[in-house]
Amino acid sequence: MTTESPDNPPSSHGVGHIVPIKTLVATGLALLVFTLITVWAAKIDLGDLNIWIALAIAALKATLVVLFFMHLRYDRPFNGIIFVTSLAFVALFISFALTDTKEYAPDVDTGNAPRVVEALDELQQ
């Protein structure tokens, strides 16, 4: 059991880091700007690149939230390594899933939707 003294200060466990308001406002504004960029990028048709751009912007926004709002920037470096590794694995898993999305596209049955619409139109008349 340890006692507090000038030579043995109390543990700082549980004490949060105070982030300057300027940093929080700048981070919030950056998140708003990236949200506007996401909306703008969604209106442009870049084909298969759209999903990658959206994922990159989302990852950047998540990184800002974790670094500044969740104080990871001021935490131990090991926790940052865990976060970056987690992001890398998520990106890897998503990229594996996206490589398979067009594999079975020729086998997809588009169904008989036009015939159903015609039948419904006939029923309404």
Image: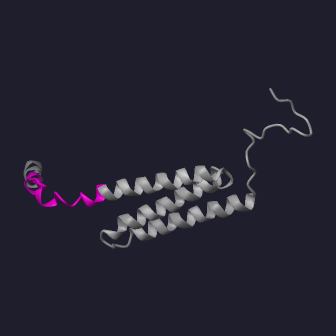
Picture quadrant of residue 4: top right
Q: Position of residue 65 (x, y in %)?
A: 58, 55
Picture quadrant of residue 24: bottom right
Is residue 101 within the magenta segment? yes
Q: Which residues are magenta?
A: 97-116
Hey, which residue is sitting farthest right in the picture?
A: 6
The foreground one among 98 and 4 is: 4
The foreground one among 3 and 107 is: 3
Picture quadrant of residue 7: top right
Hey, which residue is sitting farthest top in the picture?
A: 1
Q: Position of residue 37 (x, y in %)?
A: 49, 69
Q: Position of residue 75 (x, y in %)?
A: 66, 50
Question: How was the colour assigned to the protein in this rendering?
Answer: one colour
Give me the residue at 13% from left, 55% from top. 108
Is residue 121 within the magenta segment? no
Give me the residue at 75% from left, 57% from top. 20
The foreground one among 44 and 26 is: 26
The quadrant of the image that shows the N terminus is: top right
Give me the residue at 10% from left, 53% from top. 111
